[in-house]
Amino acid sequence: MPYVMVQIPKTPAPASPAQRSVPTSADVARLAGVSRATVSYVLNNTSAVRISEPTRRRVHEAAKELGYVPHAAARSLRAGHSRMVLMPAPSFTVGSLYSRFLGELQLALGRLDYTVVQHGSVGLHGDEAARAWAELRPVAVLVSGAGLGPKGVTVLKRSGARAVVTLGPESVDGAHALLMDYEAVGHCAARHLYDRGRRRIGVVVPEEEGLESFSAPRLQGVRRALYGTDATLTELPLAYEEESAARLAARWRDLGLDAVFAYNDEYAMLLTRALQDEGVRVPADTAVIGADDLMLGRLLRPRLSTVHIELPSGRDLAELVDRAVRNPGTPPGTHKVLGATVVHRESS
């Protein structure tokens, strides 16, 4: 019986993701039925050229279908600068109020076609941190808290940063400054307690590293409010831990305090629970006030008195950054922000 050899053609393996060609703006233009220039105008959000809304939708749909994204480096070359705004991640845990503010700011910058990058520079400080940020060639840098100095600002600007903005209690030469008047927070809290008849006032000073730039001005605000009065002030180091709060509450009666400004609402709630566990009545034995006006403070029993802090809107700050980027020769400005008002509730 004769045998016949049949060669079965080998089915080519599907192309791996690495082998597939990267979609280009030309591919988007062909699929959308427009020119490459139109694709560039739409995806770069160019306002100088009027593009109809149906055309914009076709371009965006084509880019989404193909998985096309603009090349950041190419865009930077065309514009002469990147669209990256760098925000160094704080080395400490920020409260929910500040986290909401940062989230709002990032959204507002995104609407202005900036890409926000948070940079974790753990272990780097001052000028050394500024050099690490400069390596990424951001168009703007927003630094919260303390640590950046004039030399760091110079390093960033020489690397191409058109705007350096600091958020903190002090300004830095060469940078736009949003001055956060944290002293006012402590001053409001202390005046409230004093006006309610409290004279032996404690002030919680967080032991967590990195919070000094926030806690020191608040403590100074309390000192300023009580200066020349018959009230006494006692500093109360406290870690944000149940055990630390329990140890402080256990010696509360020996301290003889009839009021406490607990730095913020989170520390106030922590300490209030520990005081109640020790049988200290709030506010009958000790009045308590926090800061930040968090919703959880309103759910606490007794409801927590607090200092409401008015931060600048994320949109306003984003527009300030955008103006500085578009006009890099403008002299750095200083803007005082952060309003503070007491919200009186049951705990004081």
Image: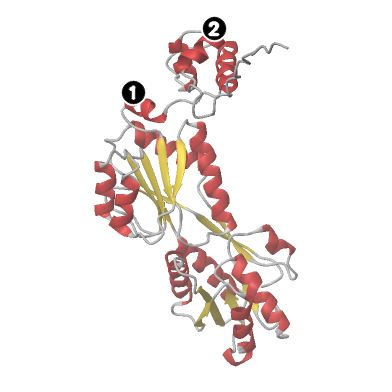
At label 2, the amino acid type is Gly
Q: Position of residue 28 (x, y in %)?
A: 52, 15
Q: Amino acid at mark 1?
A: Arg
Q: Does dot 2 land on a helix, a strand or a loop?
A: loop
Report x, y in % for residue 305. Answer: 65, 67
Closest to the observer, 148 or 236 = 148
Q: Which residue appears at 58% of the width and 24% of the height?
A: 13
- For the residue pair 167 and 131, the one nearer the viewer reads as 131
Q: Is residue 34 left or right of residue 302?
A: left
Left or right, 9 with respect to 128, comes to right
- Taking the spot 24% from the left edge, 48% from the top edge, the residue there is 154
How crowded is the residue under tag 2: few (<14 C-alpha within 10 Å), some, or many (20+)? some
How many numbered circles does the render carry?
2
Q: At 48% across and 23% down in the image, what residue appears? A: 22
Residue 281 at least partly seen: no
Q: Is residue 232 above or below residue 28?
A: below
Outermost residue to the bottom: 254
Residue topped by disc 1: 78
Which residue in the structure is indicated by mark 2?
Answer: 33
